[in-house]
Image (spheres, rainbow, N blue to C red):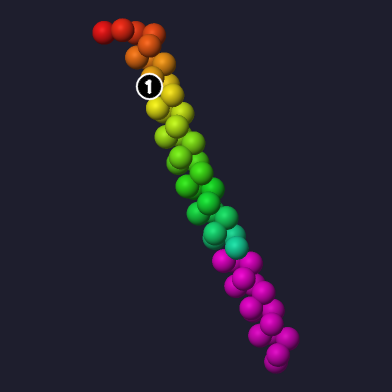
Amino acid sequence: MMQWAERGKKRTKHRKFCYDLNQEGKTMLFSLSFVFFRMTYKLNILNYPP
């Protein structure tokens, strides 16, 4: 019985780790795209003066 409990604990720990990793990836992707957007925006302003 104890073995199953331990295994379950490990599994939930792993799942939480994967979830955290997923969240990290999402936030990183979002910030990267934001920076990229701002850079291209600035470049566009420089290239095409109004």
What amino acid does circle 1 point to?
Tyr
Outermost residue on the right side: it is 3
Residue denoted by label 1: 41
Is 13 magenta? The answer is yes
**Principal SS element in the magenta part?**
helix
Position of 40 with respect to 28 (left or right) is left
Vertical relation: 16 (above or below) 8: above
Which residue reaches farthest left? 50
Spot occupied by residue 3 in the image (x, y as percentages of width and height): 73, 86
Q: How many marks?
A: 1
Residue lying at 42% horizontally and 21% vertically, measured from the top left: 40
Q: In which quarter of the image is residue 38?
A: top left
Instruction: Give the left or right position of residue 42, taking residue 23 as reference.
Output: left
Quarter containing the N terminus: bottom right
Q: In which quarter of the image is residue 30?
A: top left
Question: What secondary structure is found at the residue carrying circle 1?
Answer: helix
Q: At 57% from the left edge and 55% from the top edge, which residue is drawn? A: 21
Q: In this view, does 48 lie to the left or right of 24?
A: left
Label 1 packing within 10 angstroms: few (<14), some (14-19), many (20+):
few
The structure residue drawn at horizontal position 49% and vertical position 36%, both measured from the top left corner, is: 32
Magenta-colored stretch includes residue 10: yes
In the rendered view, tell whether residue 20 sits above or below residue 9.
above
Q: Position of residue 49 (x, y in %)?
A: 31, 7
Q: Which residue lies furthest to the bottom in this view?
A: 1
14 in relation to 22, above or below: below
- Magenta region: which residues? 1-16
- Side of 4 where 23 appears, left or right: left
Q: Which residue is drawn at 66% across and 85% down?
A: 5
The answer to which quarter of the image holds residue 18 is bottom right
Q: Which of 5 and 32 is in front in this view?
A: 32
Residue 34's x, y, as percent? Answer: 42, 34
